Image (tube, rainbow, N blue to C red):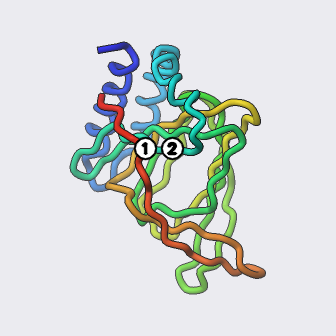
Amino acid sequence: MSQHMHTLKALRDIAYDLGANERPDLASMAREMGRVIHQQGRALNDGLAPLRKRQRGFERWLVGQRSKVSLLVMVWPANHSTPVHDHGGLWGLELALQGALEVQSWSRDDVSGELTLQGQDWLGPGDATWFEADGGYAHRCRNLSRHEAALTLHVYGGNLAQYLAYEPAARDKWLARPQRAAIAGHLGA
């Protein structure tokens, strides 16, 4: 097995071990995964370089799925931005592998549906952000590079097959549009 597949397997095993609880310690998961990226990131990026060079737009690649934990590598084309979206009430962790990502966190009022910007994080290789299982949490992510694709690893507390994307409709009003999470392929680790 190539070095990058060993690294993906190590990341997958951390997610499975630390994500098995109903309320996992996401800070510990981020710390352990970040340590692996800082030690093995070059081999991982070399092995995943073909994904960055595909130029097929934003893609999700399944790394593994076990009971209530799923892992995906996402490919972010240069300057790509997602709409504000939720995660179907799942907890999640997002870790930069290559490049830099901006993550804006939003909260959605259960009654009015109004979205309010809560803050933003900037992630470089080995940096992570996470969110608890909360139906009111949403975010928007953007590749900060105008020239190069970025790669991120996403761990979710379940299968993120469907979610809501939000688009501004009028002043302080948002339309929620159901989305299906398409998978481009499998990166068996």
Q: Quadrant of the C terminus?
A: top left
Please state the horizontal and vertical placement of residue 52, each as a whole percent of the image.
56, 29
Please state the horizontal and vertical placement of residue 61, each as a whole percent of the image.
42, 40
Tell whether label 2 touches label 1 (CB within 8 Å). Answer: yes
Mark 1 vs mark 2: which is more N-terminal? Answer: 2
Left or right: 75 as drawn, with respect to 44: right
Q: Quadrant of the N terminus?
A: top left
Mark 2 lies on a secondary structure that is strand
Circle 1: is it few (<14), some (14-19), or many (20+) Cα within 10 Å? few
Q: Measuring 44% from the left and 51% from the top, which residue is drawn there?
A: 92
Left or right: 3 as drawn, with respect to 55: left
Mark 1 lies on a secondary structure that is loop
Please state the horizontal and vertical placement of residue 163, each as a whole percent of the image.
46, 65
Q: Which mark is residue 59?
A: 2
Asked whether residue 95 is in view, the answer is: yes
Three-letter amino acid code at the position of disc 2:
Glu
Between residues 45 and 105, which one lies in front from this camera angle? Answer: 45
Please state the horizontal and vertical placement of residue 85, each as a whole percent of the image.
56, 63
Query: In terms of image quadrants, where is residue 13?
Result: top left
Provide the residue designation for mark 1: 184
Three-letter amino acid code at the position of disc 1:
Ala
The vertical placement of 53 against 108, above or below, is above
Circle 2: is it few (<14), some (14-19), or many (20+) Cα within 10 Å? many
Number of marks drawn: 2
Between residues 147 and 7, which one lies in front from this camera angle? Answer: 147
Asked whether residue 26 is in view, the answer is: no
Q: Measuring 31% from the left and 45% from the top, which residue is drawn there?
A: 19
